[in-house]
C-alpha cells in the first residue's frame, strides 16, 4: 500500500463536511460602527459580538491605546522575563487583581495561552482534571497538553463531578469550569462546585471569559456574584477580548499561584509580552467596565426586553440570564438557512454548528450588548419569528 496523501485526505474531509453543511466560512467585516457591521456590502445589526458593554470603540479605551503606542511603540520586543515587561503590564495586573478581589494577577496574550499554560504548569501525568462537558475547547485541550487524566461530567451536574472525583481519590485534582457557558449562556453551579472541591481537596479553576464585566458587583464576574473568595476559587481566569473589548487574558489568585506560573507556564515564559498599548487600553476598559454601572444596567434591560419579546412570540429560549441567548434550531442546514434569512432581513446572527455544539443542536447564538436598543431586539425577534415560520 502506498502511503496515503495528506492533501487527498483533506479533500475527502472537506467533501464530507460540505455534505453535512458543516463547512466554516471566513468572512470579512468591512465596517463596524456601534451595533452595526457591514458584511458583503450590506449594513447589518450585529448580534454576534462579545463586546457586551460596547467598549471596543470607547473613546477612553482608544485614547489609552494611542497614547501608550506613542510612548512605547507597538511591540513589547521580548518575553516578559527578558525585557518585554513594562509598567503598563504591571499596572493592568494590579487593576485586575483589585477588581476581582485576588492577591495578584498575571497577563497572558490570549485566553487560549492562559488556559493551556496554566493547567499544563500546575498538573501533569499523575494528576486528574475534572471538567464540565460544555467547557470551552481551550480548557479541554489544556488537559491534553498537561498529560493528566481528563474526567468529564454532564453539563452543570455537581453530583457527576463528585462521582468523578470520588472515583480517583489518589491524585492531585483540579476541577475546571466555564463561569458562563459560551454557547448556552447559563452560569455554572459555582457555589456547589466550590463546596465539592473543599470537601474533596480539589482545586477549582473558573474560566470567566463571558462573566467578567457582565456579572457581579462592579462587573467583577460570576465568581464575585456568587460571593466566592480566592480560597473558594483559587484559580480565576478571564479574557480581555470579550466584555472589555480589547484582547488578552489573565489568571488571578494567590501570590503562590502567580509565582508558580511565572516560573512554569510555558505560554507565559516563551511568548512575547502583550503590546504595552493593549495593556494600557485594557486598563482603561477595566475602569469603564467597573465604574460605569449604567452600561450593565442597560445590558440587563436589553436582555430582559429580548426574553420578554421572544417569549411573547413563542420562541423557545434556554435558561440564560446573560447576554448569550441561544435559539436551538437542530439541523445544521436549517440553522444556516435561518441565519441567511436573517441576514437578508438586515441582522447578523451566525449559525453555530457541530463540532462547536452537539450534533443535532445547531443554533443561533444571539449575543446582546449595551449598544442594542429595545427597538433593535424587537425587530430581531420579529425577524426570527418570521424566519422560523
Ligand atoms: C473566548 C474564550 C476563550 C479564549 O479566549 P481568547 O482570548 O479569545 O483566546 C477561553 N475561554 C472561554 C470560555 C472563551 O469564551
Image: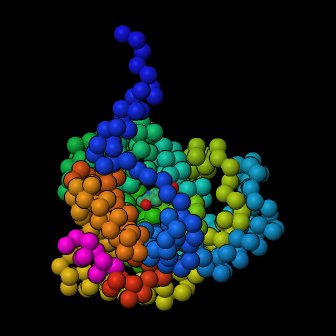
Please name the residue shown 82% across and 68% down the image.
71
In the image, residue 121 lies at what x, y percent?
51, 44
Is residue 136 among the parts visible in the rendering? yes
Q: How far across and how far down the image is residue 156, in percent?
A: 25, 61
Q: Quadrant of the N terminus?
A: top left
Q: Left of 328 or right of it: where is 87?
A: right
**In this view of the protein, which residue sits in the foreground, 190 or 333?**
333
Residue 69 position by quadrant: bottom right
In the image, 204 versus 359, the foreground residue is 359
Task: Residue 127 in the image: state x and y as whole percent.
Answer: 38, 40
What stretch of residues is rendered in magenta? 380-389
Image quadrant occupied by the C terminus: bottom left
Q: Measured along the vertical axis of the image, is residue 31 above or below residue 335? A: below
Q: Say if the magenta span includes residue 381.
A: yes
Along the horizontal axis of the image, is 88 left or right of 225?
Answer: right
Q: How many marks?
A: 0
Which quadrant holds residue 256?
bottom right
**Residue at horizontal 29 percent and vertical 43 percent from the top:** 19
Is residue 251 one of those drawn in magenta? no
Name the side, left or right, on which 287 lies relative to 160.
Answer: right
**Coordinates of residue 340 in the picture (x, y in percent):** 35, 64
Q: How is the image coloured?
A: rainbow
Residue 188 visible here:
no
Amino acid at each position: 500500500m502506498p502511503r496515503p496523501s495528506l492533501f487527498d485526505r483533506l479533500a475527502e474531509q472537506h467533501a464530507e463536511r460540505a455534505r453535512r453543511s458543516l463547512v466554516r466560512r471566513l468572512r470579512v467585516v468591512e465596517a463596524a460602527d456601534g451595533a452595526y457591521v457591514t458584511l458583503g456590502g450590506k449594513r447589518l445589526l450585529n448580534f454576534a459580538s462579545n463586546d457586551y458593554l460596547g467598549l471596543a470603540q470607547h473613546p477612553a479605551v482608544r485614547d489609552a491605546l494611542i497614547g501608550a503606542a506613542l510612548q512605547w511603540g507597538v511591540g513589547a520586543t521580548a518575553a516578559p522575563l527578558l525585557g518585554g515587561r513594562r509598567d503598563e503590564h504591571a499596572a493592568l495586573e494590579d487593576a485586575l487583581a483589585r477588581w476581582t478581589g485576588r492577591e495578584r494577577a498575571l497577563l497572558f496574550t490570549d485566553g487560549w495561552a492562559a488556559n493551556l499554560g496554566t493547567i499544563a504548569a500546575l498538573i501533569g501525568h499523575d494528576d486528574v482534571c475534572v471538567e464540565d462537558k460544555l467547557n470551552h475547547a481551550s480548557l479541554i485541550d489544556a488537559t491534553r497538553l498537561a498529560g493528566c487524566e481528563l474526567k468529564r461530567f454532564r453539563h452543570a451536574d455537581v453530583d457527576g463531578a463528585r462521582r468523578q472525583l470520588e472515583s480517583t481519590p489518589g491524585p492531585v485534582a483540579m476541577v475546571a469550569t466555564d463561569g458562563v457557558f459560551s454557547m448556552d449562556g447559563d452560569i455554572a453551579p459555582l457555589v456547589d462546585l466550590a463546596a465539592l472541591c473543599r470537601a474533596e481537596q480539589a482545586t477549582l479553576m473558573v474560566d470567566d471569559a463571558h462573566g467578567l464585566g457582565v456579572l457581579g458587583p462592579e462587573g467583577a464576574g460570576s465568581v464575585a456574584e456568587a460571593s466566592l473568595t480566592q480560597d473558594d476559587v483559587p484559580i480565576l481566569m478571564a479574557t480581555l477580548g470579550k466584555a472589555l473589548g480589547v484582547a488578552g487574558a489573565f489568571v488571578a489568585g494567590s501570590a503562590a499561584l502567580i509565582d508558580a506560573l511565572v516560573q512554569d507556564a510555558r505560554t507565559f515564559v516563551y511568548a512575547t509580552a502583550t503590546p504595552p498599548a493593549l495593556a494600557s487600553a485594557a486598563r482603561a476598559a477595566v475602569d469603564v467596565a467597573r465604574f460605569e454601572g449604567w452600561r450593565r444596567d442597560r445590558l440587563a434591560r436589553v436582555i430582559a426586553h429580548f426574553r420578554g419579546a421572544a417569549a411573547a412570540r413563542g420562541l423557545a429560549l434556554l435558561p440564560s440570564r446573560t447576554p448569550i441567548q441561544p435559539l436551538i434550531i437542530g439541523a445544521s442546514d436549517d440553522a444556516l438557512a435561518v441565519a441567511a434569512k436573517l441576514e437578508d432581513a438586515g441582522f447578523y446572527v451566525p449559525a453555530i454548528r457541530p463540532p462547536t455544539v452537539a450534533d443535532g443542536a445547531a443554533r443561533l447564538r444571539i449575543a446582546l450588548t449595551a449598544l442594542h436598543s429595545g427597538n433593535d431586539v424587537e425587530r430581531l425577534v420579529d425577524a426570527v419569528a418570521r424566519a422560523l415560520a
